[in-house]
Image: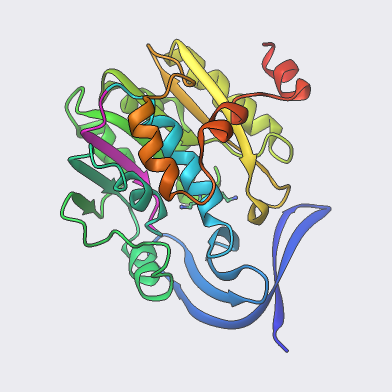
Amino acid sequence: MGHWYDETFDNHTRLGLLVKETLFSARSPYQQVEVIDTAGFGRVLVIDSVFMTSEYDEFLYHEMLVHPALTTAPRIERVLVIGGGDGGTVREVLRHPDVKECVMIEIDRMVVDASKEYLPGIGTAWNDPRLDVRFIDGIEYVKQSSDAMYDVILLDGTDPVGPGAVLFDESFYTGCKRMLAPGGVMALQSESPLLMMDVFIEIQHKLRKLFSEVHPYLGPVPLYGTGIWSWTWCSDTGEPLRAIPERQELIVEGSKAYNEDLHRAAFALPNYVKRALKL
Ligand code: SPD
């Protein structure tokens, strides 16, 4: 019959998935990596007991992390992805024919290897010649890289606990900004504005110190417990709603969720978020 795998959010909330089979489970030098086959969400990547992505709803997360940035940035030739070892984010990036090079920085080779083997439907772009995957520490990469190299930077990290926590530091965001070309856009996953309101707000404040345009946007990701998830669009110029029509049309056609209406609607914030952000 299988067993239940729970992600525990706090003292009173957890999400349980009925597991048919554990396909992979091993400890890397950084974290516990698992792939479970579940009755409701299909195959699920789990890192340190936190659900990362699932065959069932990954498109809701990856399409919304990538396309608001890639349809609005003035140039998208060079894209940097930090994290995203399951391959879903780079898959969406590489659907854009204007992207000439996508560098993906992932600290943990085991996440990519396990995803390639057990989640082949998520990472479908591993063999794209424009993709350059480097197994190095994102923090070090950002510290050491020279200025203004990328048109778009996407941060696809875990939650701000464990080894991924540093990807939420102000110094890390500062380093990312240094690598952004003039007019460039950075987008990142910025946690749940319900379950992790304090973290969400803290991220916004850090980003507002660095960018003149910081716009959180929301969408559903059922795997992440409270259902509602956030990403944040940042830049020093431009507007998150001013998508380039030809680029957007092309992407909308092949997307499961992303379209013009969803792009616009995602940036409409409920009152509790506006008030928390003092907007
Ligand atoms: N609560 C889990 C948040 C995970 C965000 N990143 C997921 C990575 C999917 N590529």
Residue 277 drawn at (x, y percent): 67, 17
Q: Identify the coloring.
A: rainbow
Residue 143 drawn at (x, y percent): 26, 32
Residue 37 lies in the magenta-colored region: no
Give left or right: position of 175 versus 54: left
| Tag count | 0
- Front residue of 115/125: it is 125
Residue 83 lies in the magenta-colored region: yes
Give the quarter of the image for residue 125: bottom left
Give left or right: position of 102 versus 14: left
Which residues are drawn in magenta?
A: 75-85
- Front residue of 143/250: it is 250
- Front residue of 234/73: it is 73
Q: Residue at x 46, y 62 (%)?
A: 31
Whether residue 278 is situated above or below residue 6 in the rendered picture: above
- Front residue of 220/134: it is 220
Q: Residue at x 33, y 53 (%)?
A: 107
Residue 241 drawn at (x, y percent): 49, 21
Q: Looking at the image, can residue 23 be seen? A: yes
Whether residue 36 is situated above or below residue 105 in the rendered picture: below
Which quadrant of the figure contains the C terminus? top right
Residue 118 drawn at (x, y percent): 42, 75
- Single out the residue that lies furthest toward the bottom: 1
Give the quarter of the image for residue 186: top left
- Single out the residue that lies furthest toward the right: 12
Give left or right: position of 50 versus 208: right
Q: Looking at the image, can residue 47 be seen? A: no
Which quadrant of the figure contains the N terminus? bottom right
Q: Residue at x 68, y 30 (%)?
A: 198
Q: Residue at x 65, y 78 (%)?
A: 19
